Image: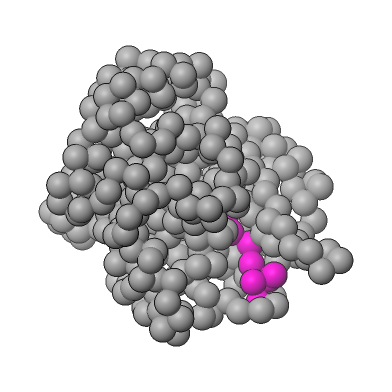
Amino acid sequence: MAEATGSGPYAVIEVGSKGVRGFVFDLDTARHERCHKNYDAYLGCLDLKRLESINVSPLQRGSVDATADAVATHVATLKDRHGVDETRIYIVGSSGIANVEHRDHLMVAIEDRVEPAYAMDFVSADMEATHAFDGLLSLGRSQIRGPAHARLLVIDIGSGNTKGSYLEVSGGEERVVGFGIPWGTVSATNQIDANRGSGAFAPAAADWRDHALLPELEAALADRPGARERDLVYLIGGTPWALVTLMLPDNTDKAVLIDGALVQRFLRETSAPDAGARLCSANPRNTPGSAIARVCSVFTVDNLAAGAHIVSALATELSFSKSGKSVFFIRDSQFAWPLGYLQSRLSGDHTAR
C-alpha cells in the first residue's frame, strides 16, 4: 500500500557518499499505458526533474550538520518550487553511507532538521542494486520485454562501492540477484592512497588492481554464475559517465556501446603521467558548462584512474569483448535506483530500515 497521500509528484532525496541529490517523479502519470510505448514516452510522462547536487561529505562525522542543511535545502525546494507534498518525499541514505559509524547521528540530525513524514531510510548494496535493476527496467520497458529482461546485467559503479544485479528465473519464479565489491571511484582512490606511501599513484593503482580488486571481484562472482552468462550489460554510475564523456565526447546517444578496447584506452589515458593536463586542464573541450568540465569538477585524475581499473577488472572478469555480448553505458541512469526505490516503497515491497 502506498504511504503517500493526496496527488501530485513524488520525490526522493538521496544522501550519498559524495553529497545530497534530489529527484522528482510524476509516477501517477507514468503508470498510464500510453506512457509505455517507448523510452522517450515514458521519460516524458515521468517528467523527471533533478535538483542540483549539493556537495557535502556525509562520510565524515564533521559534515553531519552540513549534510542535514543540504537535505533541508532540497526539502524546501521540493515543496516550494515543485509542489511536492511532504507525504510524497522520501529521504534515503545510499549504500555508500549505510554502514558509517555515525549513521544514527546523521539520521537524527537530518530528522531533527526537516521533520520528514517518514523516518530516514538506508539501503544496503544489494538493495541498491535491486532498485537500480528495477528502475532501469521501468525506463526500458518497451525495449526490454518478456524473456529479454532475463539477459540483462546491471552494474553500478558508485563512489563508495560497485554493485551488480540480474534477474534469475527458476521454477517459474523470478528474483533479482545482487553482488558487489566494497570499492567505488572514491573509496578505491582512498585505499590506493593509504597503501602507496610516497610512491606514484599509477603503479600503486595497478598493484591494488592485481592483488586486491581482482581477487575481491572473483570472490564476489564465484557463486553468481548468472552474472557471467548475461549477454546484455548496462553500465551506470559516475565512472562509466566519465569514460564516455572523455573518450567519446561527440557521442550523445542514450545508450553508448562500450567494448574492451575502449575500456583499455580509458585505463591507459587516465594512468598516463600527463593525464590531468590532457584530459582536463589543457583539454580544449573543457569549456565552461561542458560535460567534460563537469567530469573534471567531480573527479580528480586519481579518481578517474581508480575508476578505470574497476571498469577494466569488470571487463576482464565478465568478458566484455566476448562475441555476442553487448555492453552499454545508459544515460539518465543516475536516477535509476532512486526510481526503483520509490516504486518499491509505493508497492509495499520495501521495508524501511
Q: Is residue 149 magenta?
A: yes
Q: Give residue 79's position: percent from left, percent from top.
A: 20, 46
Residue found 38% across the figure and 16% down from its top: 61
| Above/below status of 57 relative to 84 | above
Give how far across and how far down residue 313 sits, in percent: 62, 49
For the record, the magenta segment spans 148-156
The answer to whether residue 267 is visible is no
Please say if 303 is above or below 291.
above
Q: Is residue 214 left or right of residue 24?
A: right
Q: Is residue 128 above or below residue 172?
A: above
Q: Residue at x 72, y 42 (%)?
A: 220
Q: Position of residue 198 (x, y in %)?
A: 45, 18
Quadrant that contains the C terminus: top right
Seen as rendered, the residue at the extreme right is 171
Quarter of the view holding residue 332 = bottom left
Q: Quadrant of residue 260?
A: bottom right
Q: Compared to 31, does 245 lie above or below? A: above
Seen at 47% across and 35% down, the residue is: 121
Left/right of residue 200 with respect to residue 10 in the rendered view: right
The colour style of the image is: one colour
Q: Quadrant of residue 254?
A: bottom left
| Horizontal side, residue 77 vs residue 115: left or right | left
